[in-house]
Image (cartoon, grey):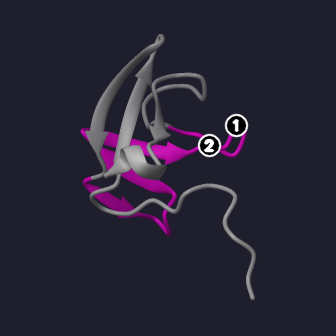
């Protein structure tokens, strides 16, 4: 038996929030690529090793990032 992942595994159609300066904008994952290290949600977001977040590709690690919506509120 393999252990459960420590975070949700991203998939196309997954609900997310785009987080920027305390504002949360609902969105949906449009594409997943690069072995699940790049997500497209209005623009490309890459997984940053320094903090484990998906951050918009053209910004530093503390820039606009994605928050996964999981659980009963995801439906």
User: Which residue occupies the extreme top position in the image?
Assistant: 21
Residue carrying label 1: 51
Q: Residue at x 69, y 58 (%)?
A: 6
* Residue 51 counted in the magenta span: yes
Tell me the CA gap for discs 2 and 1.
Answer: 6 Å
- Exactly how many numbered labels are in the figure? 2
Q: Residue at x 25, y 54 (%)?
A: 30
Q: Nearest the camera: 48 or 72?
A: 72
User: Which residue occupies the extreme front position in the image?
Assistant: 72
Image vertical order of residue 42 relative to residue 3, above or below: above
Q: Is residue 66 left or right of residue 13?
A: right
The quadrant the N terminus occupies is bottom right
Tell me where the magenta segment starts and ends, as one range.
30-54
Percent coordinates x, y for residue 65 in the rendering: 48, 31
SS of the residue under disc 1 = loop
Residue 26, located in which quarter of the rendered image?
Answer: top left
Q: Residue at x 75, y 75 (%)?
A: 3
| Label 1 CA crowd tier, 10 Å (few <14, some 14–19, many 20+) | few
Q: Nearest the camera: 5 or 70?
A: 70
Q: Nearest the camera: 43 or 74?
A: 74
**Disc 2 and disc 1 in contact, CB within 8 angstroms:** yes
Image vertical order of residue 15 relative to residue 10, above or below: above
SS of the residue under disc 2 = loop
* Residue 44 counted in the magenta span: yes
Residue carrying label 2: 48
| Label 2 CA crowd tier, 10 Å (few <14, some 14–19, many 20+) | some
């Amino acid at each position: 038996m393999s252990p459960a992942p420590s975070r949700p595994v991203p998939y196309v159609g997954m609900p997310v929030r785009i987080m920027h300066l305390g504002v949360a904008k609902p969105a949906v994952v449009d594409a997943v690529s690069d072995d699940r290290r790049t997500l497209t949600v209005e623009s490309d977001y890459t997984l940053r090793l320094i903090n484990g977040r998906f951050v918009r590709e053209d910004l530093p690690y503390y820039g606009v990032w994605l928050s996964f919506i999981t659980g009963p509120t995801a439906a």
